[in-house]
Image (spheres, grey):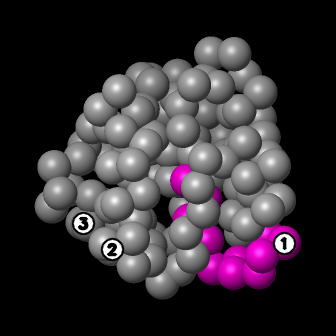
């Protein structure tokens, strides 16, 4: 499966801008959501090929949202990459246990993120 459409879930407008810019320049179509509720709305509008998921957000956090998406038969096939400032090994392990396919820490290294996306595609 080739990845073309990416949903970026992050409550930081700055992070959304940085990631949208990076992905857009590399040929991806990007949609954004700033919280779990908005993320599910976006999923209902059209299934992305990949989700980039922040962890620290108001309301439902990224770990909880990843688990909810990974357990939903309608969306469980969508790969999720955690994209967060939480850089402890325990956070990475927990994120992967919730259903994430990969984990990158902020500030995002553009080459690392793009190679991880290509590896999933």
Instruction: Give the label, 3 or 2, closer to the camera.
Output: 2
Q: Secondary structure at mark 3?
A: helix
Q: CA distance from mark 3 to mark 1?
A: 30 Å
Number of marks drawn = 3
Residue 13 appears in the figure:
yes
**Residue 70 vs residue 116: left or right?**
right
What's the residue at 69%, 33% (across, down)? 69
Give the crowd class for mark 2: few <14, some 14-19, many >=20 residues within 10 Å.
Answer: few
- Residue 81 is situated, as x and y percent measured from the top left of the image, at 55, 53
What's the residue at 16%, 49% (across, down)? 27
Given residues 68 and 121, the one toward you in this image is 121
Marks 3 and 2 in Cβ contact (< 8 Å): no
Q: CA distance from mark 3 to mark 2?
A: 11 Å
Q: Which residue is mark 3?
A: 21
Q: Give the extent of the magenta segment.
A: 81-91
Give the crowd class for mark 3: few <14, some 14-19, many >=20 residues within 10 Å.
Answer: few
Residue 14 appears in the figure:
no
Q: CA distance from mark 1 to mark 2?
A: 23 Å
Instruction: Give the label, 3 or 1, closer to the camera.
Output: 1
Q: Does label 3 or label 2 sit earlier along the sequence?
A: 3
> Any mark on residue 63, and which?
none
Q: Which residue is mark 1?
A: 90
Q: Is residue 16 above or below residue 88?
A: above
**Residue 26 vs residue 106: left or right?**
left
Q: Does label 3 or label 1 sit earlier along the sequence?
A: 3
Given residues 14 and 7, the one toward you in this image is 7
Q: Which residue is mark 2?
A: 110
Give the crowd class for mark 1: few <14, some 14-19, many >=20 residues within 10 Å.
Answer: few
Q: Does label 1 or label 2 sit earlier along the sequence?
A: 1
- Residue 10 is situated, as x and y percent measured from the top left of the image, at 55, 61
């Amino acid at each position: 499966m080739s990845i073309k459409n990416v949903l970026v879930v992050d409550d930081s407008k700055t992070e959304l801008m940085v990631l949208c810019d990076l992905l857009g320049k590399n040929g991806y179509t990007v949609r954004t959501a700033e919280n779990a509720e908005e993320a599910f709305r976006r999923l209902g509008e059209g299934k992305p090929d990949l989700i980039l998921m922040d962890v620290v957000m108001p309301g439902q956090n990224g770990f909880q949202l990843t688990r909810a998406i990974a357990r939903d038969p309608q969306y469980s096939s969508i790969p999720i990459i955690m994209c967060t400032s939480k850089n402890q090994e325990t956070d990475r392990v927990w994120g992967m246990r919730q259903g994430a396919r990969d984990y990158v820490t902020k500030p995002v290294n553009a080459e690392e993120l793009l190679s991880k996306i290509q590896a999933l595609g």
